Amino acid sequence: MRTAAKSRKTNETFIEVAVNLDDATEVTIETGVGFFDHMLDLFAKHGRIGLVVKAKGDLHIDSHHTVEDIGIVLGQLVREALGDKKGITRYGSAYVPMDEALGFVTLDISGRPFLHFDAELANPKLGNFDTELVREFFQAFSFQSAMTVHARVLYGMNTHHKIEALFKALGRALHQAVAVDPEIKGVNSTKGLIE
């Protein structure tokens, strides 16, 4: 089982996260940010991963620190759970339609963190979630997991639908990339190493 767990405490947040890349049985999300809980639940469901997130953040200010810090910890744990990365497919891509919106995510578990994010989110707030935090989450996750991630909303009108398409696509792309292929000997790189 490829698993990892961690607690992280700062003056702004206290976060506990556990990840299981091989067993999606347990998914429990409690961040205090309802819309973000929904997005993480979708990410786990479509990524076929187990995910437990418990967070207490300075929501009296806003949800920025909570969302970003969860992205940081989640990225670190996915990287840890992958271990030496032997046998993994490495690449994943997914288009996901959500009614009138279409989202796309492609990623490379490369050891080289990079994010290209292209999404116009017209509605600035959904519940107590600032929609500009979608990019912050994706950036924290991609940099801490050491992945190259390209995320794009190709079109759509409803901000909720656009964001939902991106989180589902991230889960589906990750599921492809972490899959073990018995035909891959060692790591899927001519370098013989993925850091």
Image: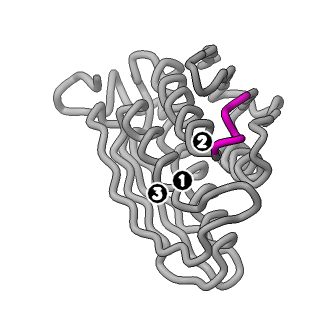
Q: CA distance from mark 3 to mark 1?
A: 22 Å
- On the image, the x and y values in percent for residue 192 come to 22, 23
Judged from this view, the residue extending furthest toward the left is 191
Q: Give the SS element for disc 1.
A: helix
Mark 3 or mark 1, whichever is nearer to me: 1
Which span of residues is magenta-colored? 56-61
Residue at numbered disc 1? 133
Q: Give the SS element for disc 3.
A: strand
Q: Give the SS element for disc 2.
A: helix
- On the image, the x and y values in percent for residue 117 come to 39, 61
Residue 193 lies in the magenta-colored region: no
Residue at numbered disc 2? 67
Residue 57 lies in the magenta-colored region: yes
Mark 3 or mark 2, whichever is nearer to me: 2
Majority secondary structure in the magenta region: loop
| Amino acid under disc 1 | Leu
| Amino acid under disc 2 | Val
**Quarter of the view holding residue 122:** bottom right
Residue at numbered disc 3? 93
Label located before the other in sequence (3 or 2)? 2
Residue pictured at 75% horizontal, 55% vertical? 35
- On the image, the x and y values in percent for residue 188 come to 31, 33
Q: Is residue 22 above or below residue 7?
A: below
Q: Nearer the viewer, residue 40 or 190?
A: 40
Residue pictured at 66% horizontal, 48% vertical? 43
- The answer to whether 185 appears left or right of 37 in the picture is left
- The answer to whether 138 appears left or right of 54 in the picture is left
- On the image, the x and y values in percent for residue 5 come to 63, 15
Mark 1 Cα-neighbour bin, 10 Å: few <14, some 14–19, many ≥20: some
Q: Nearer the viewer, residue 30 or 166?
A: 30
Q: Are circles 1 and 2 on residues that touch, CB within 8 Å? A: yes
